Image (cartoon, rainbow, N blue to C red):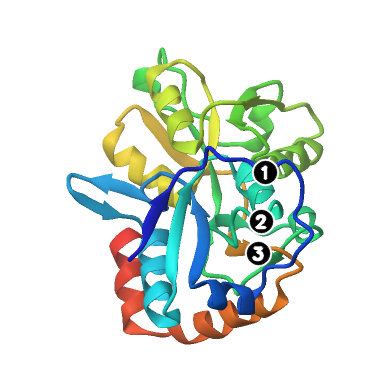
Amino acid sequence: MILLKNTATRKTKVPDFSRDYAQIIESGELNVVTDYNSIGYHVLGDTIAGFQYELMRKLERDWGVKVNVFLENSLSESLNGMVMHEYDIVARNIPVNTALKDSFAFTTPITLNKLVLVQRKAEFNDSISPIRQHLDLAKKTLVVPRNSPAILRLQNLSHEIGDTIFIRQNETYGEEQLVMMVASGDIDFTVCNEVVAEQLAEQLPEIDVETDISFTQLESWAVRKDSPVLLDSLNVWLSRFLKSREFQRTYKKYY
């Protein structure tokens, strides 16, 4: 049975031991961190739901290990926790880029997604029309979670338009909370993955999510580079599971 764990305990240095697939199977436990939102893990009444959570349940069943689920909205904190061996897998929608690939290993792509600009509709923004052209982002301030993968894309976009896009990193909130802050007028712009943005747009009539910021990106889970057998085992499992009707039902449920 999947067990939700507390993320409060922090190790201060990288352990001097390796933890790969053999050690995980021997321990009978797999430590996985995901984010608290509609795609990762969330509570609906008396039911636990989430795309990543359901995939973890399938992995627990197929591998015969207990999956301990940790919740952390900050991607950088999740990755740092994995480096410290608190987690074996970071299971969330991570857009794979060259900067991350230098430090971590990534599974076979699980989903496709893209980044969109979240802003207010004209009727909720003093009749100011939403931005549709990237050039109009010049001199605008976009607020994103601390160390968000979107930062690299926004920096590249700034170069593409030949002007400054101001990027403010929020130390406290994740994607969903920042989208809500746009809706309430606390901030003007943020960037969010399209799937989460469209789900939130159904609940928040104030927001507009029609402007793409990136091309479609591959999204995968991350593991440590010193866990090659875990990576290979996950890829073998994913190669079968992603073709199954069970995965298709789960995917359609959330996407």
The answer to whether mark 2 and mark 1 are in CB contact below 8 A is: yes
Local crowd at mark 1 within 10 Å, few (<14), some, or many (≥20)?
A: few
The answer to whether mark 1 and mark 3 are in CB contact below 8 A is: no
Q: Quadrant of residue 20?
A: bottom right
Quarter of the image for the C terminus: give it: bottom left
Instruction: Give the left or right position of residue 104, taking residue 255 as reference.
Output: right
Instruction: Give the left or right position of residue 215, taking residue 166 as reference.
Output: left
Which residue was labeled with disc 2?
Answer: 85
Using the image, tell me which numbered label, if any, was put on residue 36.
none
Q: Amino acid at mark 3?
A: Val
Q: CA distance from mark 1 to mark 3?
A: 18 Å
Q: CA distance from mark 2 to mark 3?
A: 10 Å
Tell which residue pokes out farthest to the left in this image. 46
Q: Residue at x 27, y 46 (%)?
A: 43
Local crowd at mark 3 within 10 Å, few (<14), some, or many (≥20)?
A: many
Which residue was labeled with disc 3?
Answer: 223
Residue 215 against residue 8 in the figure, above or below: below
